[in-house]
Image (spheres, rainbow, N blue to C red):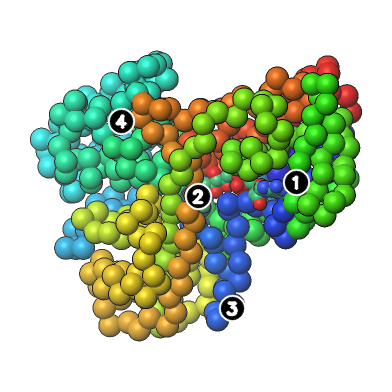
Amino acid sequence: MAAAWRLANAARRVTLIERRPYLGGRAYSFVDRDTGQQVDNGQHVFLGCCTAYVQFLGEIGTVDRAARQPSLRVEVHSPDGRGGVLTAAPLPAPLHLLPSFGRYPHIGWRDKARAVPALLRIARERDREREPLRTQSFGDWLRRQGQSARAIANFWNLIVLPTLNDDVDHATASMGFMVFQESLLKDRHGTDVGFARGGLSAAMGAPAAERLRERGATVLLGATAARLTVEHGRARCLRLASGETLTADAFVCAVRDDQLRELLPDGAIEVGKPHEWSPIVNLHVWYDRPVADFDFRAFVDSPVQWVFNRTRIGGLPGPGTYLTVSLSGAWEWWPMTKDALRERFVPELARALPQARAARVERFIVVKEQRATFRNLPGEGAWRPRQRTRIPNLFLAGDWTDTGWPATMEGAVRSGNTAAAALLASPRSVS
Ligand SMILES: Cc1cc2nc3c(=O)[nH]c(=O)nc-3n(C[C@H](O)[C@H](O)[C@H](O)COP(=O)(O)OP(=O)(O)OC[C@H]3O[C@@H](n4cnc5c(N)ncnc54)[C@H](O)[C@@H]3O)c2cc1C
């Protein structure tokens, strides 16, 4: 969407081909048939550091469909009733975190005293892509800095698990550094939390299709690209699954790496080893009464990771409450049936939310995304191609291409922007 948007704005004749009947890819919403409410396939959050994504929303005219914190405020509770809050004080970064970190109740003062020098080492690191950081896990690096299991579980992983969709022991130290540097340590507003108020598709896919068409682009929905023909070193034409063939001067492929392999002739460009993927499971729970007085809250010492109060966020009518429980790195939960997840998590939610104890669950649905995000495993390093390829009129986009960012909407938009810029700058691909 981002690549098409940039190219349409540069007066190129653009055709966007999407095999699903809507735009948005891995970030979309649907209407729940029982409640009639918009359900996101997975709770999507963006942070203050996601500048390209926010700019994209601004350009397609939907930035007001997202709630954005003026300043970081994340409540972190444990089921025993202890509550803490991480906020940004009016101090220059990274000092802005110190006051609330000092009061944070889920790790002891010794752990905090050890965490501060580790955070400062991360803040001072100028080359987070260097070999030792790419080949070791963030967890190993943290343990070398004297971080205890409790500090890792209740502070470091609180941030790494939802942002990298992986545990500190499975993410490279490079990516761990990236997350802390870009969100928490560089800028006081880098961690301000934002999310779509009323359905991801209303904030992104649907308006993007509308704006693109207004700019003269052709948006083909429900059309599957089957094969890209490459002749004499140039991409020539695209065959759709319907049998139709489209020719173009230049192509941007914005599909996942495994999907790209199917599209291209063998060896046309280097596509690398297939990525491994991490699953995300979202539980959507409707209660018959108010059960939560927050927009969102994180939990420690509980399998409930992050809870979003969709009734408050979306301004939905009461008296019931619609909660989304977002479970990242969800290998444990992925194989479980809906009933088993309900049996496991409804009591956990009652432990975490006192008001839920007497409430009745009126509806419970589960959305599992097996290939939610690619992994940045230590040692292997996620191989990520640049957006410009050796075929002069073929460009790549997608969160998995080389953006320096983890699998995020920000990474996806950045990749699209870079692919479009490369295409526009390329003398070999005419309009
Ligand atoms: C449950 C879940 C929660 C997430 N949470 C967050 C979050 O909180 N914050 C965040 O920033 N990111 C989050 N992400 C990640 C984010 O959704 C992705 O990083 C981003 O959407 C990737 O965009 P993309 O354009 O690179 O790829 P995709 O969204 O996968 O888009 C690729 C598109 O190509 C289409 N396609 C594939 N093959 C073909 C073909 N042959 N012909 C035509 N079309 C084809 C697909 O249908 C798809 O629409 C989450 C993802 C999931 C699944």
Q: Which residue is mark 4?
A: 137
On the picture, is 30 further left or further right than 143? right
Contact (Cβ within 8 Å) of mark 3 with mark 4: no
Q: Which residue is mark 1?
A: 226
Contact (Cβ within 8 Å) of mark 2 with mark 4: no
Under circle 4, the secondary element is loop
Name the residue type under label 2.
Arg
Under circle 2, the secondary element is strand
Query: Can you give x and y, in whole percent of width and height, for residue 430 in the image?
Result: 88, 24
Under circle 3, the secondary element is loop
Mark 1 residue CB less than 8 A from any atom of ligand 1: yes
How packed mark 2 is, by other alpha carbons closer than 10 Å (few <14, some 14-19, many 20 or more), is: some
Of badges 3 and 1, nearer the viewer stands 1
Residue name at image x 27 percent, y 59 percent:
303
Query: Can you give x and y, in whole percent of width and height, for residue 74 in the image?
Result: 35, 50
Residue 381 occupies quadrant:
top left
Alpha-carbon distance for marks 1 and 2? 21 Å
On screen, 205 above or below 120? below
On the picture, is 90 further left or further right than 348? right
